[in-house]
Image (tube, grey):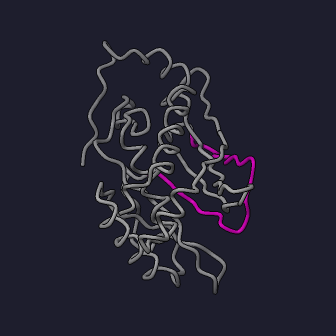
Amino acid sequence: MEPTRIDLDTWPRREHFEHYLRKVPCDYALTTEIDVTAAVEAQRAAYRKTYPAQIWALAAAVNRHEAFRMTLTEDGRPAVWPRLDPAFTVFNPETETFCCVTTPFDEDFGRFHDAVVDLLETHHESTAMFPQGPLPPHCFDVSGVPWTSFTGFTLQIRGGGEHLLPIFTIGRRIRRDDRIVLPLAIQVHHAAADGFHTGRLIREIRALAGNPSWLG
């Protein structure tokens, strides 16, 4: 898979991209809550597992937008991957460590769910951090922290000034009155996406959680 170069002569964000990549390199983190009440009910009714459903919703939303599929070519030019695949963590309770695996994103949730479940079962005893070998460059990161909820989460990425893909961290679901909410943290490179783009992404994730017909 090869990324498509962006035409800098016609790209409206060229100045913003160059500013936040070279002049004032920065990323930002945003933590929010997703109402997953409807999704949890639908997931249980369909006998689907939680983590694969969470990963699918994030991947489905991310793949709709070029801003979250950006990369740099070897000569430093911005480009867009045609598809991103999620790379997600699998916890090993025996060693209290995790590994990171990936599977191709599939718009068919049923097929994707089964592929993720197979990986979780295969690698939950893995002692290697990357048991499948080096991750492909068109992967974005998803980590689960199901042991605690949070209201803020920030990654300190040393030397990650050219990492343009988003990073997601999922917390422990909590019940609030008659609703179930999920903490979600998003790390974004400002050269790739502004607050507008991230806000839209969050709205779309909320919409997927609020109308979970895709769960089957």
- Magenta stretch: dominant secondary structure: loop
Q: Is residue 183 above or below residue 131?
A: above
Q: Is residue 203 visible?
A: yes
**What residue is shown at x 54% (from left), y 63% (from top)?**
40
Residue 216 sits inside the magenta stretch: no
Lateral position of residue 148 relative to residue 129, left or right? right
Image quadrant where residue 202 sits: top right
Observer-nearest of 194 and 26: 194
Observer-nearest of 98 and 205: 205
Percent of width and height locating residue 19: 54, 19
Percent of width and height locating residue 61: 42, 44
Lateral position of residue 203 relative to residue 60, left or right? right
**What residue is shown at x 24% (from left), y 49% (from top)?**
1
Which residues make up the magenta segment?
140-160
Outermost residue toward the front in this view: 178
Percent of width and height locating residue 146: 65, 67
Lateral position of residue 57 relative to residue 108, left or right? right
**What residue is shown at x 60% (from left), y 50% (from top)?**
35
Percent of width and height locating residue 189: 55, 35
Image quadrant where residue 175 sits: bottom right
Q: Is residue 37 above or below residue 43?
A: above
